[in-house]
Amino acid sequence: MLVVLLGNALVQAASVDPVVTTGIVSAPVNEVWKAVTTKEGIESWMVAKTEFELRVGATWKTSYSKDSTLDDDAAIHHTILAYDPGRMFSFRTVKYPKGFAFPNAIAKTWTVIYLEPVGERQTRFTGRMLGFTDDEESQKMRAFFERGNQQTLDSLIKRFESH
């Protein structure tokens, strides 16, 4: 049984395995770190628009639409939970786009990204999305993020292929 602090509440998450997404990015750790934790970096491969401050407790706002206000129905907000510069970054989703199919399940999850150097010019990226439970909504969301997180990582890998 995993126990985690989400907001001001301790939440017990079932011992359901996390969604793990891993791959090798053809860039040094410091470049991948910038791509994952800066506005310019994030907008170069992940979303059309973002507002980002690397600070524990900060709200990270994103949208797949350039026309978003970052507070509208299309926006996604995350709270930054923790980071270890160049190595680890963790967040949880606190606002999802209107019509998102898994509103109860997303509130129980969080993501941890690990970066590990593989030689001088490559980085192992490991994303772990945790907090899934055995209920139907959580399991459907799990399948959604197994595909979506892989597509996101593929975009990051592709972002550095041309360099």
Image (cartoon, rainbow, N blue to C red):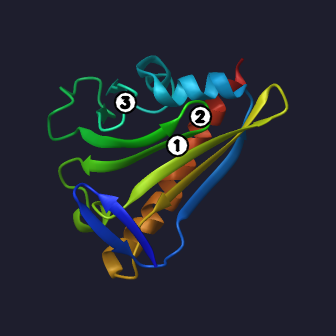
Disc 3 to disc 2, how far (Cα)? 22 Å
Circles 3 and 1, Cβ within 8 Å, touching? The answer is no
Identified at 66% across, 51% down, the residue is 22
Q: Residue furthest left?
A: 72
Q: Nearer the viewer, residue 32 or 139?
A: 32
Identified at 50% across, 22% down, the residue is 41
Tell how many labels.
3
Circles 3 and 2, Cβ within 8 Å, touching? The answer is no
Q: Is residue 103 above or below residue 63?
A: below
Q: Is residue 152 left or right of residue 140?
A: right
Local SS, label 1: helix
Image mark for residue 152: 1
First in sequence: mark 3 or mark 2? 3
First in sequence: mark 3 or mark 1? 3
Which-is-in-front pick, marks 3 and 1?
A: 3
Q: Residue furthest right?
A: 119
Q: Which residue is mark 2?
A: 156
Q: Is residue 135 above or below residue 80?
A: below
Identified at 46% across, 33% down, the residue is 46
Q: Is residue 1 left or right of residue 107?
A: right
Q: Which residue is mark 3?
A: 55
Circles 1 and 2, Cβ within 8 Å, touching? The answer is yes
Q: Is residue 63 above or below residue 148?
A: above
Local SS, label 3: loop
Image mark for residue 135: none
Disc 1 residue crowd, few under 14, some 14–19, many 20+, Cα 10 Å:
some
Disc 3 to disc 1, how far (Cα)? 23 Å
Name the spot of residue 121 as percent of width and height, x first.
Answer: 80, 25
Name the spot of residue 49 as percent of width and height, x first.
Answer: 33, 25
